[in-house]
Every structure is written in C-alpha cells, then in structure tokens.
Image (cartoon, rainbow, N blue to C red):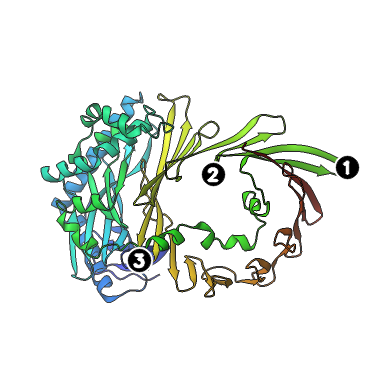
Amino acid sequence: MYKIIIIFVFCLLTFYGQSQLMDVFQNKQYKTSSYVLSAEIKRPYSPSELEIVQDKNTEKPENWVKLEEKLFDRVVQEVKNEVSFFQIQSKAIQYQNKLEESKRIEGQYTRNSMQPKFKSVDIVLLSVMNNCGIYVVNYNFEIYSKVHYEAQRGSIDQYYFIDYKKGTITPFNDTPTLAQQQVLKELTLEKFNRLYLLQTQKINPKDIDRIDEMAKSQIKNFESKLFYKEAIVYPYLAGIVVEFPELSNSSQLFFNYPFRIFLKGEDVEELLRVYTQFKSAFNQPLIAPSEQAIKQLNNDDNFDISRFSVAPKELQLLKYLDFDKTIRRLSINNFYIRDTVIKQQQTKIFYFNKNQQVERREIIDGMGSLYNEKKYSYDAKNRLVMIDESNIDGNFTLFHYQKNRLDYKDNLEFVIERHYDPAVNLEWSQKHYVYHQNYRYAFDVNLVGGFDPNRYIETRNLEENKYCSSYACLLLDENQNILGVKKKKGAPIDILMNDKNQPVEVYRDRDRHHHEFFYDESGRIIEYKATSDHTSETKYTYEYHDDDNKPLTIKEYKRSYSNVNEREYVYEVEFWE
C-alpha cells in the first residue's frame, strides 16, 4: 500500500464497490467505483489522516479526472478551513440536539456529554444527466447519546452540480428562496399530502377513485406542517427529487424520517424556471418513441428470455384451450402424489371479467381456508390501475398513466407494528418509467426513509430486428421469427425453434442445463423436460380433454439426486352465460 502526502495532496489506498450509472438523456452508461483516499489534516477537530471515499469514473476521461480532483481539493479545503468547518460542525450539533429531542419525546432519558466527533467524508455521485454530474458530500460524524451509551452515525450533506463540458463546480441546496418555495408548493403540496394521508391511513388505497378528492379536502391542515424552507432539491436520472431531511420540522409528519417525491416531465419544466442552475442537466430533452415502439417496449414477453428455460405459466396455457365461450372462473387443483396416496394441497382460482381480464386470484389451502388473494382493478380504457393484496399481505400496487403509456407505479406495503401508535407503518416506493428514443428505463424511488441512489435501473431498447435488455438481445428475422438470444451477461444460451416459432430445444451454459419442448400437430405443448448437471430432472406432461369444464391435466415429475416429487394439476373452467 502506497501513500503520498503533500499538504492535502491525497493518494489512492484502495477501492471498493462498483456501480453503473445511466445517463438516460444520452443513452449512455458509466462505470464508477468508490475509491478510499486519504488527506493529511493537521487540525484538532479532525483525524490527522482523514479518510475520504470518493466515487470516480473508472474510464478516467480527462475532463472527469480534473473535476474529480478539484472537488476532492475543495472538500479538503472545507475541512482545513476552521471557519467553514465550524459551520459544518454547528450543523452537526444542531442535528445532535434534534436527535436528543426526538428521543426525549419518545420517553427515552438522554443527556449529552460529548460533542459530535468528525470521522470521515464520502463524495457520492448521485446521477449523470446530459454530461452533468450531481454529487452529495457527506461529512460524517459520530453522534453520542447516553440512551445506549453508544455513538451513531450522522452526516451533514453538501450538494454539488458539476458540468463536465464547461468544467464548472457549483454548490447548491442553500435555503430555497421565497420564489422557489412558492413554485415547490404549487407543484408538490398535493402530492406530499397524498403521501401523508396514505402513510397515516387517513385514506385507504382501495378508494383509488377518491384519493385525489379526499387529499384536496384535507390539505389546509397539512399545509401548516410542511415548511418548504427546509426542502432539498436535486436532479436525479430524468427528473428532480424534492426531499425533506431527517429530523427537520417537516419530518415530524413521518416520525422524523426523511421523505421525498420525484418530479418529471412538465413539473420539471416549471421548476427549472426558478432553479436555473439545473438547466444544463436538461438541455437535451427526452424524445418519446412512437406509439408502436412504446407498445413493444412495454410488452414483457418481448424481453422475457426465461420462457426458453421454464414450462409455460398457468394462464399462458389458455391459448391452447380453444373455447367458444368466455371464461368466468378457472380453478387449478394441486394434488400431491406419494406412492398410491393422492392428497389435494391447494387450489388456485382465477376470476375473469367479460373482457377476459383477471379480476381476482385466490389460493385456497388444503383445509379450505383462504391463503392468499389478489384483486385487480381496471379503468374505462381496460388498463390495469390497481393490484390489491391487502386482505393477506397488506400490499397495494397503483398504476398511473400519461398519454396512454405507463408512467409510474406506487408500491405500498403496510407493516403492522402492534406495539406502536399508530399501529401501521407504510413502506412506499415508486417505479418510474422513462421513454427516450427507442429506450425505456425503469427505476425505483423510495418515498420515505433513506435514499438509495444506486438502485438497479432496468433498461430496454429496440434495435433492428432485436429486443434488447441489460442482459440479452432477442434476435429476430424480418418476419419477427426468433433466431436466437445473444447474452450480454452470464452464461450463453442456444435455442432451436420449430416452423411455428416455438422453442424445441434449449441449452444454457453450454450443456449444463438442457430443456426440451414437445408439441402435437396443432401446436399445443404436450411435454416439457429439463435436466441440470445430470443431478436434477423436471418433466411436465399435458393431457387435453374433450370436456370444456375439465379441459386439461398437468402431471409434474421432479427429481433431485434420489429425491422424487410428483404432482398433478387439474384445470376446471366455468363460463359466463
């Protein structure tokens, strides 16, 4: 390990943690690593060898390297300068006081005997947008409390906007101006109120048609508890995050947790009127694909290469059952077979509306009790708008559309904590969809609690006769028949298709995993076989019956080494009159 020290000149000690950042405006991916650096700080309030962990572009383009070094030097100067560090430390003391106050409110006796102790610095690259980088610098302190006689970590954060093309570094996120606060309020108040009312269960996600109306009726009381002078605003991926930090006055609405919303589209354009320093991050706008391209990008089957290595899913088999009536109810009875004993273990029931969309799915256990339930709701355009699993798991998924395309999903999970008041905590994240040229990006933003900027970004794109994801491309001919799969990551996959564009034989990881599909003359699947490393075997056989009410029986055989399991699935169908 080498170390070079020149006043505050630093050296690379090691690096850990690699990640990939996507600039969705440029359809470009950057590989970054977190490097552990050090700087000599001869000050009584700092470690003499200050550890600084900095995110860097591993490809080391010259303009990035220069700006990364400038940002590092600027951070070191902030620590070495006693006046600037005093301001950071004062914020750390304020943080400690607010933490102690929150613990006293919870009934915990606290008394501080030590000031916060400065420990290290993290320089985190949050996002890259149109050749601009959004950074947050965490000045990390140990916060001491006599509740448990232990220190906990707290950080004072400073945000920077770096324009790699212009070579500029600009700090931001001072207290918003009155003009900025007014625009933030106009754009976000109702959204934050909706988040609050759902979080505290003052409204129910089941009332999806009334949520906005109910939120507006209760907005006055909420407005007095939200202080926009505390807001933190920063660009992220394809939009702007508006966040209220932990232990702020506003965070009392959410039990002192940080909370946020993600703005995009027209809301961003409005916000840029008063946040002009962010304009270069949005100088190249997103270009929406054609309606046909969006339909292809949103078709999961186009990008699902797992279908070549698994048996068809339950509802996919309905295409082989040629009914001249519409299905009202489908029951799939699951029987476990052991020697000569057959025991029913569970029944999965699907209820369909007259448009043949699933409205409810139930799983009944072997004792006849409801084990799991999902309910599906649709709008007047037959688009899925809600999945309700609240009766069993306390989960909801709400779907939101803009210009006839999926815009984002709310994923809500209610966690019951019976020893707290209120008794229900809400874990809430959103999955946002961004369309640009022939690409679709999907990413999660958690709304309450710590913010994780390194969440996985799902990428899809259309190329000529190709459907591509982050992992693989499905190759097609001019008639959209499948030619093969080109893997970008992981083991290779070889596919043999028949003249009906159905998989017949598949090899994964050369010959470690072997899959075979067999069909009858009409193209119905009659058998699926899979073997792995010659130690496990799976086989499904499909028996079709001339009985509309009991049209299909599936027999399952699974062997792992010497252990064998057998099951039978019986389809029973009821129809609409």
Distance between the Cα atoms at labels 2 and 1? 38 Å
Q: Quadrant of the C terminus?
A: top right
Three-letter amino acid code of the residue under disc 3: Gln
Name above or below for residue 492 compared with residue 90: below
Q: Earlier in the sequence, mark 2 or mark 3?
A: 2
Badge 1 local density, few (<14 within 10 Å), some, or many (20+)? few
Three-letter amino acid code of the residue under disc 1: Thr
Q: Is residue 85 left or right of residue 18?
A: left
Count of numbered tags:
3
Q: Which mark is residue 357?
A: 2
Q: Which mark is residue 99?
A: none
Q: Which mark is residue 340?
A: 1
Residue 364, how many percent across, how many down? 66, 34
Residue 247 is at least partly visible in this image:
no
- Of tags 2 and 3, the one toward the viewer is 2
- Of tags 2 and 1, the one toward the viewer is 2
Q: Is residue 246 left or right of residue 503?
A: left
Badge 3 local density, few (<14 within 10 Å), some, or many (20+)? some
Q: Quadrant of the N terminus?
A: bottom left
Q: Earlier in the sequence, mark 3 or mark 1?
A: 1
Distance between the Cα atoms at labels 2 and 3? 31 Å
Pointer 3: what residue? 437
Q: Residue furthest right?
A: 340
Of 57 and 231, nearer the camera is: 231
Residue at the (46%, 61%) spot, across then down: 296
